[in-house]
Amino acid sequence: MADEPGGGYRVTFKDPVVGVPLHLVYEQAPVTAQGGVPSCDRAFNFVRRRRRRCCLTIVSPVQKHREGNKFQRFTGGPAPVHKLGHFGMCVTDFAAAYRFYTTRFNFASSDVVYDDTDTSGDMTTFLHLGRGDELVDHHCFFFEGPVRHVHHASYETYDVDTQPLGHDGLCSKGYEDCRGVRRHLMGSQIFDHWFDPSRFVLEHYVDGDLVNRQGTTRLL
C-alpha cells in the first residue's frame, strides 16, 4: 500500500457468506489532522462523557458548569471527522456470518437483537473489538439478515456542537437528510444520517457507549 494514505500492508479476502471483498490492513501510519485537531476544552453546562471516558454525570437545570459572562459563538462548516467509527452490512445467513466473524477475528458482541416469534433469521448484532480491560467503542462492525446489501458507514466527529454545525452545512448545500439528528438505542450515539449522491447512507455520530470484557452481551 505504498501509494495509499498511511501506507502499510493489506490482505484482501471475500466474506464467505455474501462474497463482498474485505481488507485487513496493518502497519498503517496515522495521518496528521489537517488544520489541527479541534479543541476539547470548550465549556459546556455538563461534563462530557467522552472527555471523562467512564464517568456519567447527572445533569439538571440547577447544575451548570459554565463560567459567567463568557460567551461562545460558532462558525459553520463541515464537521471534522476523527475516524471511521463503524461499518455495517446485511447478510443472507446470520448464523454463518456470526460464527465466521466471532471465531476468526477478535470481535465480541455488545448487543444481539432478535425476535423469538420470527423464524426468518432476521437478526442483528453489534460487535466491538475485544481488547481486554481497555474501553473500546460499543461497536465498530455490525450486520443483520436476511437480505444482502451494504448498510452504511459511520464517522465519529468531535462533540455535540461540531455535529449539528456540520448538519446545517450539509443542509445548506442541498444534500438529502436521511433521518435527522437523533440518538440510537444500541450504542446510544447521537447520530446524523445522510444520503450521498449514489443513495448510500453515511453517518456522523458523537457520544457513544464504551465497553470492555467486564461487560456482558445483551439480548434485546
Image (spheres, helix red, strand yellow):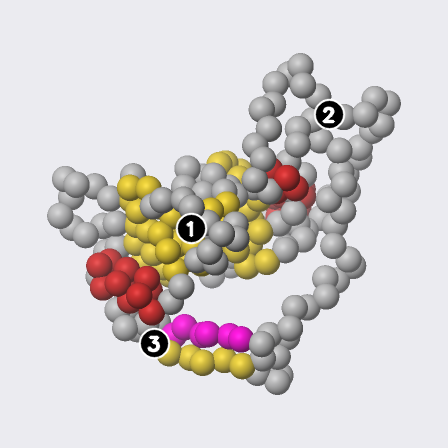
**Residue 112, position as x, y percentages in the image:** 30, 47
Q: Nearer the viewer, residue 171 or 37?
A: 37
User: Which residues make up the magenta segment?
Assistant: 21-26
Which three-letter amino acid code belongs to the residue tagged 3? Answer: Lys
- 31 w.r.t. 175: above or below: below
Residue at the spot 56% in from the left edge and 32% down from the top edge: 56
Residue of label 3: 14
Kindly report the distance in space between the C-alpha atoms of the residues bearing marks 2 and 1.
33 Å
Which badge, 3 or 1, is on the more N-terminal residue?
3
Q: Where residue 213 is drawn, which disc sits there?
A: 1
Which three-letter amino acid code belongs to the residue tagged 2? Answer: His
Residue at the spot 60% in from the left edge and 28% down from the top edge: 57
Give the left or right position of residue 28, taking residue 147 as reference. Answer: right
Magenta stretch containing residue 128, yes or no? no
- 197 w.r.t. 111: above or below: below
Residue at the spot 55% in from the left edge and 59% down from the top edge: 84
Between marks 3 and 1 in the image, the one whose residue lies nearer the viewer: 1
Badge 3 vs badge 2, beta-carbon distance below 8 Å: no
Between marks 2 and 1 in the image, the one whose residue lies nearer the viewer: 1
Between marks 3 and 2 in the image, the one whose residue lies nearer the viewer: 2
Q: Where residue 65 is drawn, which disc sits there?
A: 2
Badge 3 vs badge 1, beta-carbon distance below 8 Å: no
Label 1: state its secondary structure. loop
- 137 w.r.t. 75: above or below: below
Which badge, 3 or 2, is on the more N-terminal residue?
3
